[in-house]
Amino acid sequence: MSYRCRICEKKFDAIPENAVEVNHQSFYTTYRFPNGLVHDLRVVAQPTPQPEVERQEPEPKQFSTGTMAHAFRNLKR
């Protein structure tokens, strides 16, 4: 689980144990870190790795060897 600060946009892997929770609002929690900095953190969802799918090339389409006359047969003049 990781966290992103909406104040400074920094990403954290963990919240320090000695950080003090200052405020909690909706999805964000404000912490005062031991160095005195304040960060408003939200949990960032980790993307789930998708399994590699082996893709096969489709077979080439076979076209008629006839003339183009059949394509224009039903056109209105």
Image: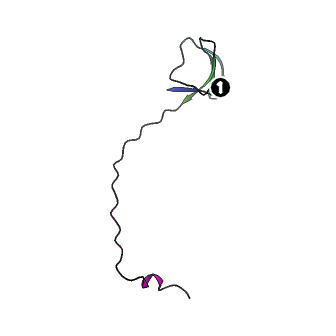
Residue numbers of the magenta segment: 49-77
Q: Residues within 10 Å of mark 1 (few under 14, many from 20)?
A: few
Q: Amino acid at mark 1?
A: Ile
Q: Position of residue 12 (x, y in %)?
A: 53, 23
> What residue is rendered at 51% in x and 20% in y?
14
Residue ranking furthest to the bottom: 77
Side of 59 relative to 17 (left or right): left
> What residue is rendered at 35% in x and 68% in y?
61
Q: Is residue 28 magenta?
A: no
Q: Nearer the viewer, residue 25 or 59?
A: 59
- Residue beneath label 1, please? 7
> What residue is rendered at 54% in x and 30% in y?
44
Q: Position of residue 3 (x, y in %)?
A: 55, 26
Q: Position of residue 51 (x, y in %)?
A: 37, 41
Q: Nearer the viewer, residue 66 or 31?
A: 66
Q: Main secondary structure of the magenta part?
A: loop
Q: Quadrant of the C terminus?
A: bottom right
Looking at the rendered structure, the secondary structure element under dot 1 is: loop
Applied colour scheme? rainbow
Number of numbered discs visible in the structure rendering? 1
Q: Position of residue 15 (x, y in %)?
A: 54, 18
> What residue is rendered at 56% in x and 28% in y?
43
Q: Is residue 73 magenta?
A: yes
| Vertical arrangement, residue 32 with respect to residue 1, above or below | above
Q: Image quarter for residue 62?
A: bottom left
Q: Image quarter for residue 33?
A: top right
| Vertical arrangement, residue 29 with respect to residue 48, above or below | above
Side of 7 relative to 69 (left or right): right
